[in-house]
Image (tube, grey):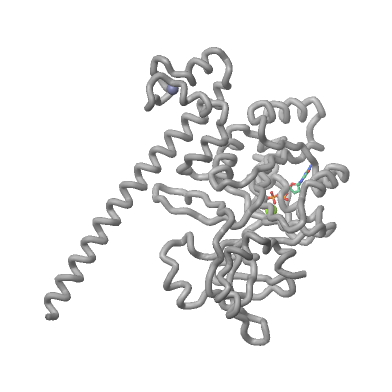
Amino acid sequence: MNITHLGFDKWFQEKSDPKKRAEFEMARVMTVNKNSTIITDGKTAVFAEMSGKFIFNADSPLNYPAVGDWVYVQYFNDNTFAVIDGILPRKSLLKRKTAGKKIEYQLIAANIDTAVIFQSLDFDYNPRRLERYLAMVHESKIQPIVLLSKRDLLSSAEIEKKTMAMKKDMPNIQVLAFSNKIESDLERIEELLIPGKTYCLLGSSGVGKTTLINQLMGEDLWETQPVREKDSKGRHTTARRQLIVLKNGALMIDTPGMRELGNIAIDSGLHDTFKEITALTGQCRYKNCSHSIEEGCAVLKALHEGKISRERYENYMKMKRESVYHEMSYVEKRRKDKKFGKLCKSVMKQKKNQMI
Ligand SMILES: Nc1nc2c(ncn2[C@@H]2O[C@H](COP(=O)(O)OP(=O)(O)OP(=O)(O)O)[C@@H](O)[C@H]2O)c(=O)[nH]1
Ligand SMILES: [Mg+2]
Ligand SMILES: [Zn+2]
């Protein structure tokens, strides 16, 4: 196997720096731990560290390697250890806001072609939460697929009802009910997965993400655990994000179940997730219509006429409010940072003057 099999296609060829290519090897990030990173070139997987220059130049957490990143590396000690010197431009970057008020992002994965969003049909089914995932995925310009898992636990009438409800709300999104216990379902999923493309599995703990990977590998390579009986919650079995090469050549990133999605500052993500609503906003009487009380609001009109769903409208408004709030706190933070920057500069200047 070589880097082409790992997804190093024409896009990355063109984005890579020929001078650096002459000096360094290319590798893909498989896992990011607190203190170490594991990279692979398709032949071996080795521990890697960032070079001092790299750390010095990375002025934001967004510039550190994430799972799925392509990096320039140099090998040492008989190819048993590598040093990362730089990251290639990313095709896409999945990130979410960390819990708490601060505007900080956590990198989920880079260079994802398709996000596979899981919801299990029994305890986890929740269209409003799915809209949150979709907004996050759309914001990163990544194509989503929705997998409704554990269909073996429900009657076919229930499955039909739940799947149709999702499809009706989200007509442009591929929604598939499946079970890790049904061979023909697994074959169908395998057919969807294209060799060399990268898929990132997302969703709550206990919905069967790792089980799917084990099934597709034909071996129980990664740990899975039953959900808790008392409240049907997953046990957060998968602890870190990890890139896995499947038997059919597709690349899959397993992720730990998310406790919460965090409030995300979203713009185009919201637009693409609630298309039937955002298509109307241009027809409102007022340009800055908030779609909540205004006369001549095309969104409210459609809502009253039953043309858009109330649940989706409410979720849209809720996420929009959050996103405006975060935008504001982001601007505020920037202003404070700027003030702080100015303060630092003036202190430095004073010091300089004192020295002269
Ligand atoms: N009945 C049924 N159980 C399943 C199915 N898929 C997975 N399970 C079970 O659900 C439990 C949780 O599965 P995991 O694969 O560990 O879930 P996960 O999404 O990886 O969870 P985290 O790693 O915690 O995020 C395990 O006991 C699996 O055997 C399915 O299709 N049907
Ligand atoms: Mg798991
Ligand atoms: Zn309006």
Furthest residue toward bottom = 77
- Residue at the far right in the pictured view: 183
Nearer-the-camera pick, 173 or 127:
173
Quarter of the picture containing the N terminus is bottom right
At x 48% / y 41%, what residue is drawn?
Answer: 266
Residue visible at 48% across and 59% down?
62
Q: Of residues 130 and 65, which is closer to you in this image?
A: 65
Q: Position of residue 174 (x, y in %)?
A: 71, 37
Q: Is residue 78 left or right of residue 342?
A: right
Q: How many marks?
A: 0
Whole-percent x and y of residue 284? 43, 21
Q: Is 341 located above or below residue 207 in the figure?
A: below
Q: x%, y% of residue 21?
A: 60, 75
For this orientation, the residue located farthest to the top is 305
Looking at the picture, does residue 254 appear above or below residue 17? above
Residue at the (87%, 43%) spot, across then down: 184
Quadrant holding the C terminus: bottom left
- As rendered, which of 122 and 63 lies closer to the eye? 63
Q: Position of residue 74 (x, y in %)?
A: 59, 80
**Can you say whether 315 is above or below 87 in the image?**
above
288 with respect to 186 (left or right) = left
In the image, is 155 to the left or to the right of 240?
right
